[in-house]
Image (cartoon, grey):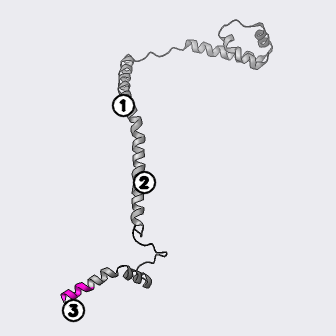
Amino acid sequence: MNCNEIHEQLVDVAGGVETPLEVQNHLHGCTACTQALEQMRKTMTLLDEWQAPEPSPYFDVRLQARLREEQRKGAASWLDWFRKPALGFAAVLLIAAGVGLYEYNETPNRPGTPVSPVQISRGTAVGDLQFLDKNSDILQDFDALDELDGTVENAPEMN
């Protein structure tokens, strides 16, 4: 037998189980395995001397109270399992709707208005001409309002 096979059986040998003849012969010839067996026996002796500490006198009472609390929580646990993903999904949906509305409001071309191939900003000569062209009906109505009040020369001056 080799040392690896002996190491697998050392716990049984140290525990007092009957030792096979092959293991005894190997232990007489191998000092490393003999030292490992002695260390195992010392460890077993220390474990036999060890005393488990006594539990607190109120341990059982506290354990039973904790078990009752957990059983009460168990009834609502399926709702918690459902609620967290549902709230997360609702938050994502609200954010997506907000971004969509923001992008919709930021687009310069609303449905029903013609799309120009080039968007030119107002304040430039071409942009001002495009504005006057698009809003010519409204601007003509302002001229009609001025005619109702009289001529522009008779209008009071604004300061």
Quote the CA–CA distance across marks 3 and 2. 55 Å
Asked if 48 appears above or below 79 in the picture, the reply is: above
Kindly identify which residue carries mark 3: 151
Amino acid type indicated by mark 1: Ala
Q: Residues within 10 Å of mark 3 (few under 14, many from 20)?
A: few
Q: Earlier in the sequence, mark 2 or mark 1?
A: 1
Viewer-nearest residue: 11 or 120: 120
Kindly identify which residue carries mark 2: 96
Q: Earlier in the sequence, mark 1 or mark 3?
A: 1
Judged by depth in the image, the label closer to the viewer, 1 or 3, is 3
Viewer-nearest residue: 4 or 154: 154
Tell me where the magenta segment starts and ends, as one range: 143-149
Q: Residues within 10 Å of mark 2 (few under 14, many from 20)?
A: few
Q: Position of residue 65 (x, y in %)?
A: 35, 22
SS label for mark 3: loop
Quote the CA–CA distance across marks 1 and 3. 79 Å
Amino acid type indicated by mark 2: Ala
Residue 48 falls in image quadrant: top right
Q: Position of residue 47 (x, y in %)?
A: 58, 15
